[in-house]
Amino acid sequence: MSFVFQLVREDEGLPPMVVFEDSTTPGLVPVWEEAGVYDALYNSDGRVGRDVSRAISYGLDRVTEDASLAQLMPPGVSQGEAIRFLENVNRACITHGAAWIRTR
């Protein structure tokens, strides 16, 4: 099972459309908590991308620069995977700032 982060956009007269989707292992929860992005990822349903982009950016910096967070990685998951996921989510939240967040 994986954690899925989506951004959904609604245009006038058209059905909602997923404009971004990425997934990662739920085993990274301890990393997300320590990096300060847990709420921005897991408790953001219905918010818009621009509301969480600053928190995601901060967490990305933490995961990139704080080597001690590597200790929290689950077996078989690299720090690079956590960085890749946060980079993608951060870029999408900035690009699609008005799109609303859906997680599962």
Image (cartoon, rainbow, N blue to C red):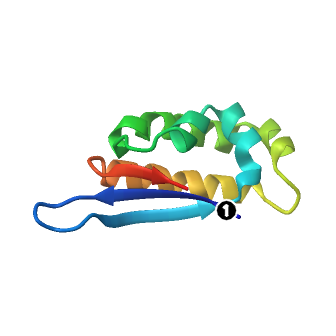
Relative to 23, say whether 53 is above or below: above
Quadrant the C terminus occupies: bottom right
- Quarter-of-image position of residue 49: top left
Left/right of residue 88 with respect to residue 73 in the rendered view: left
Left or right of 44? Residue 26 is right
What residue would you read off at disc 1? 2
Q: Nearer the viewer, residue 40 or 73?
A: 40
Q: Residue at x 86, y 42 (%)?
A: 71
In the rendered image, the residue lying farthest to the left is 13
Q: Nearer the viewer, residue 18 or 59?
A: 18
Is 66 displayed left or right of 76 in the figure? left
> Where's residue 97, x and y in %?
30, 47
Q: Toward the viewer: 62 or 15?
A: 15
Q: Nearer the viewer, residue 9 or 31?
A: 9
Q: Residue at x 27, y 63 (%)?
A: 16
Going 11% across and 60% down the picture, which residue do you hit? 12
Label 1 crowd (10 A; few <14 / some 14-19 / many >=20): few
Q: Tell me: 80 left or right of 76.
A: left
Residue 66 in picture, x, y percent from top left: 73, 36
- Quadrant holding the N terminus: bottom right
Report which quarter residue 23 is drawn in: bottom right
Helix, strand or loop under label 1: loop
Image position, residue 54 (x, y; %): 43, 34
Q: Position of residue 51 (x, y in %)?
A: 37, 36
Question: Which residue corresponds to the image point at 83% horizontal and 42% vertical from the top-left?
Answer: 72
Give the amino acid type for the residue marked by disc 1 in the picture: Ser
